[in-house]
Every structure is written in structure tokens, then in C-alpha cells.
Image (spheres, rainbow, N blue to C red):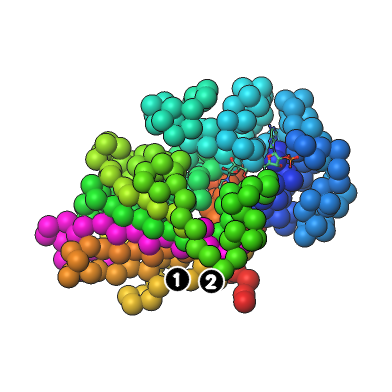
């Protein structure tokens, strides 16, 4: 069976990456692409790397253009998806790359986003531990999927095994992330100009204001089986001059009686059988260059007894494993297809 697909936000970075992955998916026919200010223009003008999709023209994003497909991907600025999801009741599978359907707590939504709160959907991170099982079990039956925030899924995947096994204390997590500007989208912003970024590392959303914080707390609370109140995280992203990629360094105190073997076993058991999340051998740490274009999260783990903390370094391509790859992997699960179809563990280098 071939599934018909519409991708909204197709002129943007996330929409473009969803299209790149779907273009090579044997079970998918990309029928409709939509945009906003660029509607009416050829897709190829905005995504010149997507040569095989040159036939497509960007249409207006309306409930009518999105309706009538087997699958709809929404890759819109946060706050925009809800108006379309309400009108897509007949669509068998809807996957939102935005934040609108990620949070279960309206209070957290009000504090970090504001505007209308929409119901939470199945969270699109298949490898995440949730109450002793993997999130993929939920995704297999899902018809509505919220793809993750890129920073949020990177940090959640980094720490969920330790939190779930009780070998780290989730009440004192510190995460510092080097992130590329594509994570902030394609629209023009002064702080993202080459003149502001090249040759500089620029911190932003310092001091507990970044919108991915409640998503991480929610995911780690689900991993631990506890409440989000028990997850405290200091989260600091730093914009660095690489177009794609996230290098997240997270640490948390070692739980009182956890041995080195128990700590490492938590991550080995969580990810030993996973295709797209890989724990590197002891002493090895990932680089963003190793995951560019790949649906891979590479994780390095250090046990720092002097500091009394576990340090986890994770590298992810924000546009693949951080968004579009997670969305396509979740789609495969929901359709009952092989989970890794059209996704690669291999990146591009140099
Ligand atoms: N970039 C990432 O690494 C990343 C990672 C995870 C999640 N996400 C999420 O994915 C979503 C899209 O992000 P992005 O980085 O792709 O942003 P982007 O590059 O700025 O693209 C935004 C897209 O949405 C369209 N759009 C803007 N306003 C709209 C409106 N009012 N109604 C309908 N369409 C509208 C734009 O169309 P025009 O170009 O025609 O104006 C464009 O196609 C966001 O919710 C973001 O949080 C992004």
C-alpha cells in the first residue's frame, strides 16, 4: 500500500527535512506541500536540494489543502498547528513537529508558551523509557503524534536510563548544549545572521526560560515513574557556528549507593538493542560531525567520582533524530512498517 502525504511548513527547515526523508520512502507518495508567505512558489525554489520533488508547488496551508491525505505532517511555528489539527479529524495519521501537542500540563504550556492549550499526543521518541517500557509501544497504536523538541529529546534520551534505574538523582540536573542555528528555523532573525554567529559562541534563554525545559521534565518524570516536580534541571543552550547539530553535555549526582557497573549497565540495558541510539564504549565521546544527516543519537558516558556526578555527552542532528527522523520513525511504527524504513544510521562527512 502507498500512503498519500501532505507536508505543511514545507518551505521551512523541519518541513524540508521531513520531505528529504519521505522522498526516499518506498511506501509514501508526497502529494501536497504547503507554506504561508511563500505559497504559490515552486518547492524547489525553497528546497533546492530536493531535486526529486521539483514537480511540487507550495500551496496555501488551509484545512482544505491538508484534508484528504492518509498522513499529514505539520511543521509550523508553535501555536499554529492547533487550528489545523481540529479540522483534520478524518485524517488517519497526523504528526506535528511543533510544540502544540507535546505537553501534558496546561500550566507548563501557559508558563513557557502561552495561547490556546491543545491536547497532548503520543510523544514521538520511540527509544524513550516510560514506566519500564519503551515509548514505541504507545506509538504503534498512535493516530496523533507529537514529534519532539530537538534539544528536549537529546537531553531526555541522555538521562532517561539513569533516572529510570535510580542511579542518578534527577533533582539536580545540569545541561549545557552547543546548538546550531537551524534549530531556530529559517525565518530572518538578527541574532541568527552570519555576522552575529560566525566566530562566536552565543548563549541564549539562560536561567530556566528555554521552552524545552518542561518537555524534558515531563519525559524524565515519565521515565522515573514520578512527577515532573521531582525533576530539576538547569538548562543552558549556546548557539555555535555549525548549521546543524546539538552537542548536549548533561550531568547529575550519582545516587548514593550506585556502583560504576550499575551506572553503566543502566544505559547499556536501555540502548543495547536500539538501532538509532548508541552508547559509545567507555572513554569515547561523540562529535556532532558524526551524526550529520543521520537518524542517530550517539551517547558517551563518564562517571566522575571526584565530582560525585555522572556526565553524559550526546550528539544529535537536530533536523534528523531531533525532528524529521523522529517523525518518520514514529510514522513507521504507527503504520506497522519496519521502524527504520527510509532512515539511516550513517551520516555525511566531513
Ligand atoms: N528546526 C529544528 O531543528 C526543529 C526541531 C524540532 C522541532 N521543530 C519545530 O518544527 C516547527 C517548524 O520549525 P522550522 O525550524 O522548520 O521553522 P521555519 O524554518 O521557520 O519554517 C516555518 C514554516 O512554517 C510556515 N509558516 C509560518 N507561519 C505560518 C502560518 N501562520 N501558517 C502556516 N504556515 C506558516 C513557513 O512558511 P513560509 O516560508 O511560506 O512563510 C515555513 O514553511 C516549529 O514548531 C519548530 O519548533 C524544529
Q: Is mark 2 on a helix, strand or loop?
A: helix
Q: Is residue 256 magenta?
A: yes
- Vertically, is 240 above or below 128? below
Q: Is mark 1 within 8 Å of ligand 1?
A: no
Q: Residues at badges 1 and 2 in contact (C-beta under 8 Å)?
A: yes
Residue at figure coordinates x 37%, y 50% from the top left: 235
Residue 125 lies, in percent from the top left, at 47, 48
Residue 227 lies, in percent from the top left, at 27, 36
Residue at figure coordinates x 38%, y 65% from the top left: 313
Q: Locate the N terminus and report the quarter of the image it occupies.
A: top right
Residue 319 lies, in percent from the top left, at 59, 54
Quarter of the image where ligand 1 sits? top right
The residue nearer to you, when weighing 218 against 93, is: 218
Compute the Cα span from label 1 to label 2. Answer: 7 Å
All told, the count of numbered labels is 2
Residue at figure coordinates x 70%, y 50% from the top left: 16
| Residue 20 visible in the picture | yes
Which contiguous range is marked in magenta? 239-265
- Vertically, is 171 above or below 76? below
The answer to which quarter of the image holds residue 344 is bottom right
User: Circle 1 sits on which residue?
Assistant: 286
Point out the residue furthest to the left here: 257
The residue nearer to you, when weighing 198 against 212, is: 198
Question: Is 6 left, or right, of 347 in this rendering?
Answer: right
User: Circle 2 sits on which residue?
Assistant: 290
The residue nearer to you, when weighing 181 against 52, is: 181
Bin the neighbour count of mark 1 within 10 Å (Cα to Cα): few under 14, some 14-19, many 20 and up.
Answer: some
- Vertically, is 173 above or below 72? below
Residue 183 lies, in percent from the top left, at 57, 52
Q: Does the magenta stretch include residue 325?
A: no
Q: What element carries label 1?
A: loop
Residue at figure coordinates x 49%, y 27% from the top left: 114
Amino acid at each position: 500500500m502507498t500512503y498519500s502525504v501532505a507536508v505543511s511548513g514545507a518551505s521551512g527547515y523541519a518541513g524540508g527535512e521531513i520531505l528529504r526523508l519521505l522522498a526516499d520512502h518506498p511506501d509514501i507518495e508526497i502529494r501536497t506541500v504547503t507554506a504561508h508567505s511563500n505559497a504559490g512558489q515552486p518547492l524547489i525554489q525553497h528546497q533546492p536540494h530536493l531535486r526529486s520533488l521539483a514537480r511540487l508547488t507550495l500551496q496555501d496551508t488551509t484545512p482544505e489543502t491538508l484534508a484528504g491525505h492518509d498522513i499529514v505532517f505539520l511543521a509550523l511555528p508553535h501555536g499554529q498547528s492547533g487550528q489545523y489539527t481540529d479540522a483534520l479529524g478524518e485524517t488517519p495519521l497526523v504528526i506535528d513537529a511543533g510544540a502544540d501537542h507535546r505537553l501534558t500540563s496546561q500550566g507548563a504550556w501557559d508558563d513557557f508558551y502561552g495561547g490556546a492549550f491543545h491536547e497532548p499526543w503520543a510523544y514521538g521518541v520511540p527509544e524513550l523509557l516510560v514506566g519500564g517500557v519503551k515509548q514505541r509501544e504507545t506509538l504503534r497504536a498512535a493516530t496523533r503524534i507529537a514529534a519532539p523538541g530537538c534539544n528536549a529529546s537529546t537531553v531526555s534520551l541522555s538521562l532517561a536510563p539513569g533516572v529510570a534505574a535510580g542511579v542518578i538523582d534527577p533533582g539536580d540536573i545540569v545541561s549545557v548544549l552547543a546548538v546550531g542555528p537551524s534549530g531556530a528555523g529559517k525565518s530572518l532573525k538578527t541574532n541568527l545572521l552570519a555576522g552575529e554567529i560566525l566566530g562566536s559562541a552565543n548563549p541564549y534563554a539562560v536561567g530556566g526560560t528555554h521552552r524545552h525545559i518542561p518537555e524534558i521534565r515531563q519525559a524524565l518524570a515519565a521515565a522515573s515513574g514520578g512527577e515532573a516536580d521531582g525533576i530539576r534541571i538547569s538548562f543552558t543552550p549556546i548557539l555555535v557556528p555549525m548549521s546543524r547539530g546539538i552537542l548536549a553535555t548533561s550531568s547529575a549526582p550519582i545516587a548514593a549507593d550506585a556502583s560504576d557497573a550499575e551506572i553503566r549497565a543502566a544505559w547499556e540495558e536501555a540502548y543495547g538493542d536500539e538501532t538509532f541510539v548508541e552508547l559509545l564504549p567507555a572513554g569515547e565521546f561523540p562529535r556532532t560531525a558524526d551524526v550529520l544527516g543521520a537518524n542517530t543519537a550517539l551517547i558517551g558516558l563518564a562517571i566522575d567520582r571526584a565530582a560525585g556526578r555522572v556526565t553524559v555527552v550526546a550528539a544529535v542532528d537536530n533536523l534528523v533524530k531531533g525532528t524529521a527522523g523522529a517523525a518518520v520513525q514514529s510514522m513507521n511504527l504507527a503504520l506497522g512498517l519496519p521502524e527504520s524504513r527510509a532512515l539511516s544510521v550513517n551520516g555525511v562527512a566531513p
